[in-house]
Structure formats: C-alpha cells, structure tokens
Image: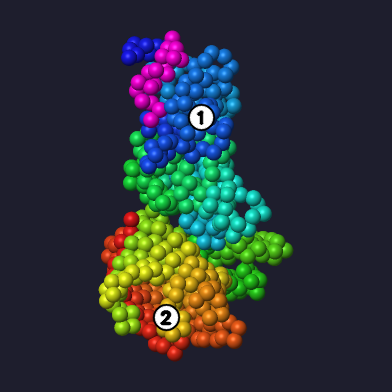
C-alpha cells in the first residue's frame, strides 16, 4: 500500500495513480460531478452526460471514470506543453486532484483563462429564474441561468453589465415551434453552455417575452465561486445533448452548483423531469440563497402603472396613446401637476411597450414619444412611476409540480374510483400562488378508472400535452386566449359502448377579468378524433366553450358549458356538457376537489360526479 508520505512535489504519475486508486477517487462524488458521470443503477456502469469527445482525455473517458482520472493525472503531471494545455483546459479537475492528493498547486500560465476570468470579474453569483412563457415550447416551464456579479455591483448599471452563464438548446433559427418541441423532447439538439451580458437576457425575457425575473443571490464562498467559474470554462461550448424534460437549462445549473459545493448532490433530486421552478426550490431548500429580488417585466410594470390611475385618468391615457388627445389639451392641463406627471409617464411607458409588443410603427411612436417627453419635462417634478410590489408568493413557493389524485364518485348508474398521475405542471384549478394567472400546462397525465361492481380497471384518458393561456382583455391590452391538446380519451360511441380514441383539439377566443380573481372566457373550439371504432374512422367538431373561472388563494372554481357538433361524411351529432369544478387549497401541497358533469350525446343523458384529494410532490 502506498504510504501517505509519498505525497510530495516529486510524486510520480504512477504513485499518484496508485494513491488515487487506493482512495477510490474515481468514484468520489466530486470527481463524478466534474466529469458529469451518472450511474446505471441496474448494471452499475457509469456514463458521462457530456457528448463531446473534446471533454475527455481518455478514449474510454465517456464510460470509465477510472480511465479518465488516470488520463487526467497523466496529462497534468507530465512535464511539457501537454501538461500546460491540460491544466489550462481543465483547471477545476487539476485543482481538485492536486488538493485531494496533496500535490502542490504549482502556478501555470493560462493567458486565455486568466483573461476570461478577469473579464467576468466575479465576486458574487446570482441564480435568475425567468417565469414561464406559454408562447414558446422552450420556455413553458420557465428558464434559469446564473448571473456573475462584479465586486462593484452597487448600481443597477453594474448588474446590467454583469455576465451570465446559461445552458440552452442550440436550435436552428429556421425550425418551427413544432419541430423545436419534437426535437427538444427526443434529444435532437445539442445543448451548449454560453456566457452573455445580463442586459441581453433582460431584453429577451423581460422586455420582449414579458416574463418576470426572480434573482436569488447565492451564498457561495470565494473558493466555491472559483470552482464554479473554472468548471464553466471547462464546459463552455462543450456539447451536451439537450432534453426538454430532464437534461435542460435547470439541470445543468444544478451540476455547476454540485461542482461549486461538493456534497450538495442537487442533481440526485432529478428523477423523471427537472422543472426550473422545482430546481430553484431545491436550491433554496439547500440553504444556498441569501437574498431574493423581484424584477417585474415591462408588461407587469405597465399594467400596474395603469391600474394606479383613476378611471378618468385611464381614459386620458388611452386617448393620449391613440393620438386622439394631445398632451397640451385642456383635459390634461386641468390635472394637478403630480397626477399629470403620472399620466404622462404611464402613457409614455405604455407606448414604448406597444412599440415592441404590437410593433407600433416608428412614424407613430417617435412623434408621440417626443410630445409626451416634452410635456413631462415642462413639469418640474422629480418622480418615478409606481413599481409593482413583490408578489406574496414566489414562483419557487408554489405547489410542487408532480401531482397524484384519487377520487370516488359515480358515473351514471355505477360507482367509480378515479386515479390520476401528472408529472407536470399546473392546471387552472391548482393553487394559483407562484403560477401565471389563467395558465394551464399539463404533460403526460394519466387518468385511470376503477369500477368496484365488477372489479375492473381501465384507462380513462392519456394526456400528452394540454395547454391553456387565458389572458384578459381590456382597453389597453388585447391578447388572444387559446388552448391546444392531444392524447387519447375514453368516449361514448354507438350502442352505448365506449372506446379509447386518439384526439387533437384546440381553440381560440377572449377572456375578461371583472376582478383580479375572476375570469370570464368565451372560446371557439375545434376537435378531431380518429379511431377504427368510430363508424367513419374519424370525426371532427367545431364548438364553443363558455366558462366563468375563479382563482383564489383558498378556493379555485370553474363553471361553464361546452357544445360540439361532431361531423363526418354523412354524420352529424351534437354533444352538450354543463360542468362545475371546485378545488380547496388546504395546504401548499395538498387540496380537496370536486366535479360535476351533465352531458347529452347520442340521445343519452349522462351525469357524473367526483370528490377526492390532490397531493403534490
């Protein structure tokens, strides 16, 4: 056995390799994290998630932690240019191996690395979470990245100029959203780690996509920050296959934090999926967060500023933005100076927002903006528009995303028990805290039904994807509400029989919010079902869905009616449904629910009801 006294500046490659083997360093969690190894718990074999040969020094490095460790020791301890290249390419590996083996940390000249670290000038690290954005498949669950704060970050400008480290799919600019979603789910894109200025991220997420940002300042120590930066250098531009559900932006950042603070093992919490809001929650639970700051999006800020105006002031703001009223009009000048300043500020911010969101032409925006600024500058008042308050519940404080439900009830004349599993993410009646109002996103949901009278179990519905985006309209904002989904569901066919039929449905319409917690929705829908058990092999249905939705902190409820006209060649049947839903949010991760449906289809009336509970984890 190698004596520990062999640890010295003259430690040979053979002795270092023997000592590393003696200590089992190839399977040390820190080494496994540095090279991104994951174990197959069935076979016991290791595979690195890095999919780029440039990341390995051994030809066997992809699947052998021991071979890669041996090759790394060979490279960093062999005198000559190769030693320098390896130490500069893999500074985190080099430093860790020298530290655990007692090899002196001899200096090495790495001009490119030193210049990169100097440019980043990092004294603090902040985890940034961009809220969910349903209009893009890549951002439906939100996005996370790291901001590298300089030591002089005492002003907003300093932080805007700070660098960020993020991981994302390297997608083709010409790929459609459908192609992106497909390739993102099945690993068709390489994922790369990149470094970009923070102001670019704010422009992308806050100003263009209108996503609120949450900034979580991490309590990493200087040596932990150093390891994180070294490893960011090692993986920069290295290919990792990107998977939408697990090996995504949030997962890669957990790996960086595992390297920065060995022993965290945050990636071990990832099972079937890595939802960004869940991973932020894990980071908070691990005690890594010192402070949280909320940065509202442009849309959130403008909407809040409009809400602070009186109804009469809102009318003036709308008229000013439309150009039907000039800033020098008597109605405007009649306002007290402080109120006039707020109306002008709000109108200007609204015009700038609409120039980006609705692409108002420059020939309209430029002169209007000049008139508003000129009128505002004539008021000798130093004031800023009111800013939205920090939400009471952060995105990481909402309910967990995996949901299990069980309920008992009755369907027509039979007693039933329904079991439901949903890996992700949120529906309209879940507790709304920490989620976008009016948003629903469900993936890979399974609904099964058990009949006690004959001890039978069957699949009731398989939901591949279900998305609803209900955005209220008012005098200032005119979003389109929409929905889309596909999967397979059990439905009635001829002779009172039922069949599991594949479906694709969608819809578009409008929503209005009489109060912040209430939403009225009117939507036109279109459904398509294909099955050999349907007489024509398929049928399609235009329809309408009218709903009144309440989303509250203690209770969420929905009541509505749906009507569809199923049609095929020589076939036309109407289906009408009235429904009532209610969810009581007992705790963050536990709630009770009930539902009642009354359907008329194929000359039959069918009534079903359920009472049960949801638990989230």
Residue picked out by circle 2: 497
* First in residue order: circle 2 vs circle 1: 1
- Image coords of residue 126 (percent x, y): 45, 42
Residue picked out by circle 1: 60
| Magenta span contains residue 20 | yes
Residue depicted at x 50% and y 19%: 74
Q: Closest to the observer: 111 or 1?
A: 1
Q: Inspect this view and state whether residue 364 appears.
A: yes
Report the number of discs: 2
For the magenta stretch, what is the residue range? 10-27
Q: Nearer the viewer, mark 2 or mark 1?
A: 2
Q: Inspect this view and state whether residue 205 appears.
A: no
Q: Secondary structure at mark 2?
A: loop
Residue depicted at x 70% and y 64%: 361
Count neighbours of disc 1 (C-alpha within 10 A) and say few if under 14, some if 14 to 19, many if 20 or more. few
Q: Which quadrant of the structure image shows residue 366? A: bottom right
Q: Secondary structure at mark 1?
A: loop
* Cα distance between the residues tagged 2 and 1: 58 Å
| Magenta span contains residue 75 | no
- Image coords of residue 321 (percent x, y): 62, 69
């Amino acid at each position: 056995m190698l004596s520990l006294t062999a640890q010295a500046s003259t430690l040979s490659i053979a002795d270092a390799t023997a000592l590393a083997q003696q200590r089992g360093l190839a399977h040390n969690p820190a080494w496994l994290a540095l090279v991104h190894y994951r174990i197959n718990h069935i076979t016991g074999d290791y595979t690195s998630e890095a999919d780029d040969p440039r990341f390995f020094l051994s030809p066997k490095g992809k699947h052998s932690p021991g071979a890669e460790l041996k090759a790394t020791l060979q490279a960093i301890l062999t005198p000559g240019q190769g030693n320098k290249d390896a130490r500069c390419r893999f500074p985190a590996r080099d430093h860790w191996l020298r530290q655990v083996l007692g090899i002196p940390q001899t200096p090495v000249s790495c001009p490119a690395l030193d210049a990169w670290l100097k440019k980043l000038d990092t004294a603090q690290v902040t985890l940034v979470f961009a809220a969910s954005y349903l209009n893009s498949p890549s951002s439906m669950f939100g996005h996370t990245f790291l901001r590298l704060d300089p030591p002089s970050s005492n002003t907003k400008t300093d932080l805007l100029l700070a660098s960020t480290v993020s991981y994302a799919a390297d997608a083709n600019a010409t790929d459609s959203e459908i192609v992106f979603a497909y390739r993102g789910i099945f690993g068709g894109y390489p994922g790369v780690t990149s470094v970009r200025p923070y102001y670019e991220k704010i422009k992308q997420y806050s100003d263009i996509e209108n996503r609120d940002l949450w900034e979580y300042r991490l309590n990493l120590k200087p040596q932990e920050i150093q390891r994180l930066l070294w490893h960011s250098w090692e993986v920069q531009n290295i290919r990792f296959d990107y998977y939408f559900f697990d090996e995504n932006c949030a997962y890669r950042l957990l790996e960086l934090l595992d390297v920065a603070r060995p022993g965290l093992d945050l990636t071990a919490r990832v099972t079937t999926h890595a939802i960004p809001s869940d991973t932020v929650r894990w980071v908070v639970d691990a005690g890594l967060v010192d402070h949280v700051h909320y940065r509202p999006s442009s849309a959130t800020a403008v909407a809040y500023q409009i809400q602070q105006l009186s109804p009469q002031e809102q009318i003036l703001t709308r008229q000013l933005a439309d150009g039907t009223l000039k800033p020098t009009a008597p109605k405007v000048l009649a306002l007290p100076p402080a109120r006039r300043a707020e109306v002008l500020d709000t109108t200007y911010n609204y015009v700038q927002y609409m120039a980006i969101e609705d692409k108002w032409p420059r020939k309209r925006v430029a002169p209007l903006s000049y008139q508003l600024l000129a009128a505002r500058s004539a008021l000798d008042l130093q004031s800023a528009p009111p800013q939205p308050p920090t939400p009471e519940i952060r995105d990481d404080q909402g309910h967990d995303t995996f949901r299990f439900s069980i309920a008992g009830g009755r369907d027509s004349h039979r007693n039933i028990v329904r079991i439901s599993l949903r890996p992700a993410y949120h529906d309209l009646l879940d507790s709304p805290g920490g989620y976008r109002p009016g948003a629903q996103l469900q993936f890979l949901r399974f609904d099964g039904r058990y009949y006690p009278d004959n001890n039978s179990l069957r699949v009731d519905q398989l939901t591949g994807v279900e998305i609803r985006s209900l955005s209220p309209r008012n005098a200032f904002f005119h979003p389109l509400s929409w929905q889309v989904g596909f999967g397979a569901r059990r439905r009635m066919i001829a002779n009172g029989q039922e069949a599991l039929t594949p479906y694709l449905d969608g819809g578009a319409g409008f929503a209005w919010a009489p109060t912040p917690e209430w939403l009225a929705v009117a939507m036109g829908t279109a459904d398509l079902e294909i099955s050999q058990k349907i007489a024509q092999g398929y049928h399609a249905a235009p329809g309408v869905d009218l709903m009144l939705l309440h989303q509250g902190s203690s209770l969420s409820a929905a009541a509505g009616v749906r009507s569809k006209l199923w049609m095929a060649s020589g076939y036309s049947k109407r289906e009408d449904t009235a429904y009532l839903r209610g969810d009581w949010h007992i705790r963050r991760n536990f709630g009770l629910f009930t539902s009642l449906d009354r359907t008329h289809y194929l000359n039959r009336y069918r009534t079903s009801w359920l009472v049960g509970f949801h638990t989230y984890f």
